[in-house]
Image: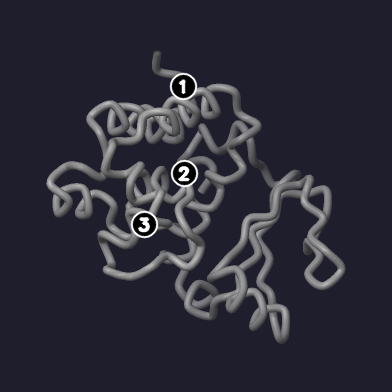
Amino acid sequence: MLSEYPGLAKNFNVGNTAIVFASGDRASRGLKERGELEFWPASAKGDHNFPSPSPGKNVLEVYSDHLKNNPSALKEAVYGDLMHGMSSDPYWNKLRSEFMKSFTPEELERQREGKTWWDDVNGSKDRFGPTYDAYIRGWIANEGDGIRGQRESGNTMYSPKQIRILEKMRNYLKTGKANQ
């Protein structure tokens, strides 16, 4: 997958990143407390009740049987979750910072109410609350069908400026080249 996304490959490789499949109680707890998978940055240790599966290494820990048994869904989920670990990339961080400073008035109101784009698309409360990365992934990885949500919200979910930033981010992941 990293060969398909040179921008990700600048930050992740087989030496510093692994995918692990949790089993038993850890898989059950992870699925309940963290979702289908969790990105653990190399710096994360977790806590004594739920330690990182491999401290010192970026780890994508898979809890969901659905992802374990569906390579296509797993690839999409890994692609989306690796974006969490892009914080060490200066160009990505620059774009992410621009994005975070450019929410529409409608989205700022949703955030004050504790909602995200996920609510608009799926009609339910996102159990994790609003996160900038959810907005970013919602467009780039199309999780929760953020593009459909943009249409259904009357183009208020993302501003034109945000869409330009998100497209730069998507292009960077695909090419590994900064597009000023």
Q: Read off the residue under disc 2.
A: 132
Badge 1, how many Cα within 10 Å: few under 14, some, many 20+?
some
Mark 3: which amino acid? Glu
Q: Residue 168 occupies which quadrant of the picture?
A: top left
Badge 3, how many Cα within 10 Å: few under 14, some, many 20+?
some
Residue at image coords 66%, 71%:
21
Q: Residue furthest right?
A: 48
Query: How far is disc 3 from disc 2 in space, using C-alphas?
Result: 13 Å
CB under 8 Å between callouts 3 and 2?
no
Disc nearest the viewer among 3 and 2: 2
Mark 2: which amino acid? Tyr
Tell me: 169 left or right of 39: left
Query: How far is disc 1 from disc 2 in space, using C-alphas?
Result: 23 Å
Query: How far is disc 3 from disc 1 in space, using C-alphas?
Result: 24 Å
Can you give x and y, in whole percent of width and height, for residue 10 in the image? Answer: 60, 31
Question: Could you say which is closer to the camera, residue 157 or residue 24?
Answer: 157
Lower position in the chain sequence, tag 3 or tag 1: 3
Residue at disc 2, secondary structure: helix
Residue at image coords 62%, 73%:
33
Q: Read off the residue under disc 3.
A: 143
Q: Read off the residue under disc 1.
A: 177
Tell me: 145 left or right of 24: left
Lower position in the chain sequence, tag 1 or tag 2: 2
Residue at image coords 48%, 59%:
129
